[in-house]
Image (cartoon, rainbow, N blue to C red):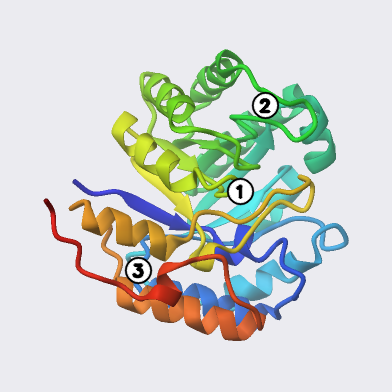
Amino acid sequence: MRIEICDVGPRDGLQNDPKILEPEVRAELVNRLAGAGLPRIEAVSFVNPARVPQMAGAEQVVAAIDRTPAVLYAGLVLNEKGYDRLARTSLDDVHFAFAATETFNMRNSNATVEESMQTAGRIVTRAHEDGIRATVTIGASFGCPFEGKVDPGRILDLAARLVETGPDEIVFADTIGVAVPKQVKHLVAEGVKLGRPVAVHAHNTRNTGFANAYAAIEAGASVLDASVGGVGGCPFAPRASGNIATEDLVYMLHGEGIETGVDLDELISVAGWLEDVLERQLEGQVYRAGTFAPVAG
């Protein structure tokens, strides 16, 4: 069995960090992740730098990347203006994201959910016309920091409508880290029935992220998002902490006999490098504890 991992560290990982890194340093992080064998990397986001200064200079980051042919390089956008910027770069995949609840989506994207749904359809169409993959992420799929619980039926209705626009992939995002495995299994299993590859974006805010990632695999997810060192969080979601750590996820998957194509030792060195760059201990554990060869019992 094989699972693809998309490392979102250069984008989601850094967007909430107090230290702002220059574009060339962020490009080096992308290059190091590619060197560790990550098949997908979310390298940048094309958002307003006044709102998210950590993501300023996205075009400069992309220009400084040493492209590896086997890697799918992606960028996040929240609107068509962001897509216009992305389309002028060499990125392979557009990740359009919106939140499933009105309050969160208005704060994050300054749009209603219906407006974002319409934007998603237009971006998917434009991307395919431009020869770019299109992934759509439904944020706050499991819970909202402002409106609380989210009805899974609502998420599946949104996903079904999105599938009609022809995206290459649908992502269910636990943006604030409230999900538990039962929820993840249900949403992914039902989502897979819609006929598009399903990915899960997990945060480890309440220490359920890795259990949720495993539940997603069992339910049929083909891609998992993770962030090197476990860094990350959403600037517009109170108390939202980091993503599941990529090296911790790879350790678990490899121990379970699930292939990822990632060199764990090299990935651990990337996390160590990032710790030095950010000048703080990161949230991940494997890069500090070291790897081990689990024995299947």
Residue linked to disc 1: 205
Across and down, in percent, residue 43 comes to 56, 64
- Seen at 58% across and 38% down, the residue is 174
- Seen at 56% across and 54% down, the residue is 243
Give the numbered dot on residue 106: none
Marks 3 and 1, Cα distance to the nearest angstrom? 34 Å
Q: Earlier in the sequence, mark 3 or mark 1?
A: 3
In-front residue for pair 172/229: 229
- The amino acid at mark 1 is Thr
Q: Determine whether the residue tagged by mark 2 lies in a helix, strand or loop.
A: helix
User: Is residue 29 toward the left or the right of residue 182 in the image?
Assistant: right
Residue found at the very far front of the displayed protein: 297
In-front residue for pair 226/71: 226
Q: Earlier in the sequence, mark 2 or mark 1?
A: 2
| Residue 90 seen | no
Give the numbered dot on residue 117: 2
Across and down, in percent, residue 296 comes to 13, 54
Q: Determine whether the residue tagged by mark 3 lies in a helix, strand or loop.
A: loop
Residue linked to disc 3: 69
Q: Quadrant of residue 181?
A: top left
> 66 above or below 163?
below
Residue found at the very far right of the displayed protein: 50
